[in-house]
Image (tube, rainbow, N blue to C red):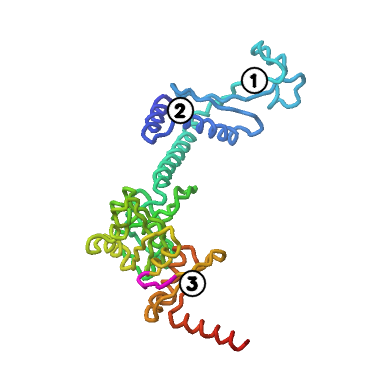
């Protein structure tokens, strides 16, 4: 190696945001391996690179002893003092053993190390950049797809949209622009692995933050989201300003704000629910669009019995129980829904049982 090579390392270190000391240390470590591979592995050796000239020196490291048993690893105290009188028993003496042809090997090794370190640095920079975007939105372009995965171009990196993260019924065609939620960024030997999603509830949250200024500013707070991607979402919101209606702010004038989110989610229905610290009120609201007559709580079991008018029963339960299921998930309460007629029949049955016993 020479001064030009050191100059190149310095420039690369600056461009790739790698400390020059890190590159030099990595080179010295790699040169130890190169020396042992080519000139014998039985020694303890170290290498030193002059950061100004690029000169490489190899030193055998020998421990100062009274009696030498292994000439490769030990040096007699008298021989050590002949080199420098400061040495005493137990010290380590560096003895230069640089081979004549080591310069060529050093140059080859250096090139390999620099390339490797640059790759590592670039991966590290990418990881830092994308790990800072975890739990956030990103726009990607569909590149290709196979039987299970859809591959997304995120600009500097490619992400995979797995089968569990794809919205049911949504088509992914080459060149399509998608808003995606970054679930996790993993550090791997091949670089950062970015896991994105179209089904995560966080996607809905971030879309509302983008679309509704009151949420972005913290005036309206999202208290909870229950989602069955591609079908229906319930979102509970609360206003810290009594003059601002949280549901109205989210829906927007003539429904434009929520409709923009529905369009982005390819027609997924969204119920905006007003959150309340009163569980009865919150549970009743969560079953929207059904109208609830009464809610009776069982605090011990954290369950609620809900009564609706007869013609609203199927609406409250929803297709295949979806409305009730999402309401339970949103509120954290087990919900049992009955119609007025069912409640009346239950009361009559109990009264009949009591009279029969008498």
Indicate which disc, 2 or 1, sits on the residue closer to the N terminus: 2
Q: Is residue 327 above or below residue 220?
A: below
Residue with the mark numbered 3: 305
Callout 3: SS? strand
| 245 lies left or right of 278 | left
Camera-nearest label, 1 or 3: 3
- CA gap between label 3 and label 2 equals 81 Å
Say which residue appears at 39% left-offset and 48% top-offset: 133
x then y, percent, for residue 202: 40, 57
Give the image location of residue 82, x and y in percent: 67, 12
Please name which of the two marks, 3 or 2, marks the residue nearer to the observer.
3
SS assignment at label 1: strand
**Residue underneath mark 2:** 1
**289 in the magenta segment:** yes
Quick one: label 3, few (<14), some, or many (20+) residues within 10 Å? some
The N terminus sits in image quarter:
top left
Q: Position of residue 262 (x, y in %)?
A: 30, 64
Residue 69 shown left or right of residue 245 in the figure:
right
- Identify the magenta region: 288-294
Give the quadrant of residue 54. Answer: top left
Q: Find disc 1 in the rendering and name its residue.
A: 93
């Amino acid at each position: 190696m020479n001064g030009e090579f050191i100059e190149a390392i310095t420039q690369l270190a600056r461009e790739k945001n790698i400390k020059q000391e890190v590159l030099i240390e990595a080179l010295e470590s790699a040169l130890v391996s190169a020396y042992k591979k080519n000139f014998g592995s039985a020694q303890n050796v170290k290498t030193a690179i002059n950061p100004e000239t690029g000169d490489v020196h190899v030193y055998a490291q020998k421990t100062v002893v009274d009696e030498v048993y292994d000439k490769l690893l030990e040096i007699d105290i008298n021989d050590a003092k002949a080199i420098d009188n400061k040495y005493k028993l137990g010290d380590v003496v560096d003895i230069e053993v640089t081979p004549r042809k080591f310069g060529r090997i050093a140059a080859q090794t250096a090139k390999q190390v620099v390339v490797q370190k640059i790759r590592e640095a670039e991966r590290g920079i990418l990881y830092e950049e994308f790990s800072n975007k975890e739990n956030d939105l990103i726009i990607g372009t569909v590149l290709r797809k196979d039987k299970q995965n859809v591959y997304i171009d995120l600009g500097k990196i490619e992400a995979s949209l797995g089968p569990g993260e794809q919205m049911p019924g949504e088509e992914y065609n080459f060149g399509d622009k998608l808003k995606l939620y970054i679930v996790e960024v993993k550090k791997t030997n091949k670089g950062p692995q970015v896991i994105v999603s179209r089904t995560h509830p966080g996607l809905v949250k971030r879309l509302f933050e983008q679309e509704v200024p009151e949420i972005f500013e913290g005036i309206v707070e999202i208290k909870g989201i229950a989602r069955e991607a591609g079908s229906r979402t319930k979102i509970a919101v609360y206003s810290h300003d009594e003059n601002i209606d949280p549901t109205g702010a989210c829906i927007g004038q003539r429904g434009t704000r929520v409709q923009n989110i529905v369009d982005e989610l390819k027609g997924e229905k969204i119920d905006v629910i007003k959150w309340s610290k009163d569980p009865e009120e919150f549970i009743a609201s969560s079953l929207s669009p059904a109208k609830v007559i009464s809610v009776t709580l069982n605090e011990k079991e954290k369950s609620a019995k809900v009564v609706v008018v007869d013609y609203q029963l199927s609406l409250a339960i929803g297709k295949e129980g979806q409305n009730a299921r999402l309401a339970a998930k949103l509120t954290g309460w087990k919900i049992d829904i009955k119609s007025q007629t069912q409640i009346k029949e239950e009361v009559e049955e109990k009264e009949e049982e009591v009279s029969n016993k008498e």
